[in-house]
């Protein structure tokens, strides 16, 4: 039987688990330090932990549940990792190099049920949620990779934008966030973490009330219900009006800007008229957000969509700016590898079926 990843425990949960088995809080802090500061990959390497405690940990937990299956590196330093889980499933994790540091994009589910019509992640339906430990371990594996390099960089930023809908795996998402921001561990600043959602309205309210001070990003991609429903089926259940109400609630409780993610699709949602409509939609909260205009990475299975032409992208950008909406065109990373989220996983699974 597969053991549970110890990375799935928050510090409080580790303290409680060991306390119930006769160990003091100080012992849990030692284990935590070995995991996140010294970054050992074997319990036996925790040399100042009593042997009885080591055996207890080995009986119930494991440190490594992911194995590297494929690694791609782009000319700009972006790296895409395809990890195999203990049950054989595959997930993607991406490391990106920026002027401001190292960013990692993590996956939260095996597959995705949101079903956005332009996205490679949804080509395979969700088979299960990732545990909080499996999400944390993506960060740890990237950090271990960096530890082996001469410059020994640290992961400084996290985006929860990989395969799956994070708010559809809500409890494990919260545990993951509490682990990575803990100042005794990886100590990644909450303001350097962004969670993206396709717009699960009830969870936006719930997430707001947790008061975890990370950033929120919304995959919007259209300014009206007709167009958004056509490209994002979630809009049928949670239309734009309800989504906008939840965003206003979030902004009323947090002193943080929201990111509006907007993938530009040629002749679908990239016209000047659509840009004007988007500016109208965001008008009341435009000072509390910015729009991230994202060039589309074509996916073979979604051939009905093409990347917007540069003139359309610039026109869309200029229209929003003239209407007072903060926006930027996202810098692309990893364009010479399988750039679209879920693309590498989908290709690998096709290869394995052929065999």
Image (cartoon, helix red, strand yellow):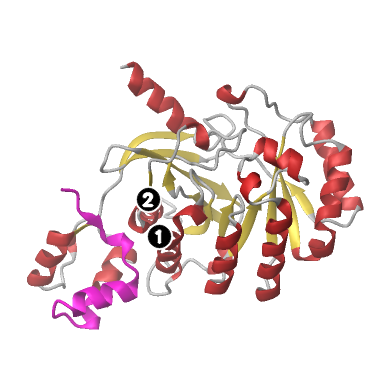
Contact between marks 2 and 1 (CB within 8 A): the answer is: yes
Horizontal side, residue 230 vs residue 130: left or right = right
Where 259 sits versus 119, above or below?
Answer: below
Tag 1, which secondary structure?
A: helix
Name, please, the residue furthest toward the top.
354
User: In front here: 33 or 195?
Assistant: 195
Q: Is residue 154 above or below residue 48?
A: above
The residue positioned farthest toward the front in the image shown: 237
Q: Residue at x 55, y 66 (%)?
A: 207
Q: Image point 44% across, 25% down: which residue?
A: 347
Residue 36 is situated, as x and y percent measured from the top left of the image, at: 33, 65
Disc 2 and disc 1: Cα gap in Å? 8 Å
Tally the numbered discs: 2
The residue singled out by tag 1 in the image is 172
Instruction: Determine the secondary structure under disc 2.
Output: loop
- Tell me which label, 2 or 1, sits earlier in the chain: 2
Give the residue at mark 2.
130
Q: Give the image location of residue 237, x and y in percent.
A: 62, 49
In which quadrant is the C terminus drawn? top left
**Relative to the observer, which residue lies in front, 59 or 277?**
277
The residue shown at (60%, 40%) is 333
Residue 2 percent coordinates (x, y): 19, 49
- Can residue 295 be seen by looking at this rendering? no
Q: Quadrant of residue 13?
A: bottom left
Residue depicted at 37% across the width and 50% down the height: 130
- Residue 353 in view, yes or no: yes
Q: Is residue 321 left or right of residue 208?
A: right
Residue 214 % position (x, y): 56, 66
């Amino acid at each position: 039987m597969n053991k549970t990843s110890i990375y799935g425990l928050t510090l409080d949960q580790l303290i409680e688990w060991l306390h119930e088995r006769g160990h003091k809080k100080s012992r849990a802090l030692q284990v935590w330090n070995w995991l996140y500061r010294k970054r050992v990959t074997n319990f036996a390497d925790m040399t100042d932990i009593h042997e009885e405690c080591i055996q207890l940990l080995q009986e119930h937990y494991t440190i490594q549940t992911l194995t590297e299956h494929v690694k791609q590196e782009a000319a700009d330093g972006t790296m895409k990792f395809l990890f195999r889980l203990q049950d054989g499933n595959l997930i993607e994790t991406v490391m990106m190099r920026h002027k401001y540091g190292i960013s990692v994009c993590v996956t939260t589910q095996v597959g995705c049920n949101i079903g956005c019509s332009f996205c490679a992640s949804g080509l395979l339906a969700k088979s299960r949620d990732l545990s909080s430990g499996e999400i944390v371990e993506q960060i740890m594996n990237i950090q271990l990779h960096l530890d082996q390099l001469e410059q020994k960089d640290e992961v400084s930023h996290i985006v929860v934008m990989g395969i799956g809908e994070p708010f559809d795996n809500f409890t494990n998402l919260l545990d993951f966030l509490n682990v990575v921001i803990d100042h005794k561990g990886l100590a990644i600043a909450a303001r350097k973490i962004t969670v993206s959602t396709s717009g699960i309205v009830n969870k936006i309210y719930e997430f707001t009330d947790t008061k975890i001070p990370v950033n929120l990003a919304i995959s919007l991609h259209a300014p009206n219900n007709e167009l958004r429903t056509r490209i994002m089926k979630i809009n049928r259940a949670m239309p734009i009006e309800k989504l906008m109400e939840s965003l206003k609630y979030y902004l009323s409780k947090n002193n943080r800007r929201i990111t509006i993610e907007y993938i530009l699709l040629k002749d679908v949602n990239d016209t000047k008229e659509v840009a004007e409509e988007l500016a109208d939609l965001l008008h009341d909260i435009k000072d509390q957000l910015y729009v991230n205009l994202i060039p589309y990475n074509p996916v073979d299975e979604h051939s009905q969509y093409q990347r917007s032409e540069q003139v359309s992208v610039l026109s869309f950008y200029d229209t929003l700016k003239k209407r007072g909406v903060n926006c930027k065109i996202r810098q692309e990373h990893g364009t010479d590898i399988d750039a679209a989220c879920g693309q590498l996983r989908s290709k690998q699974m096709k290869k394995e079926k052929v065999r």
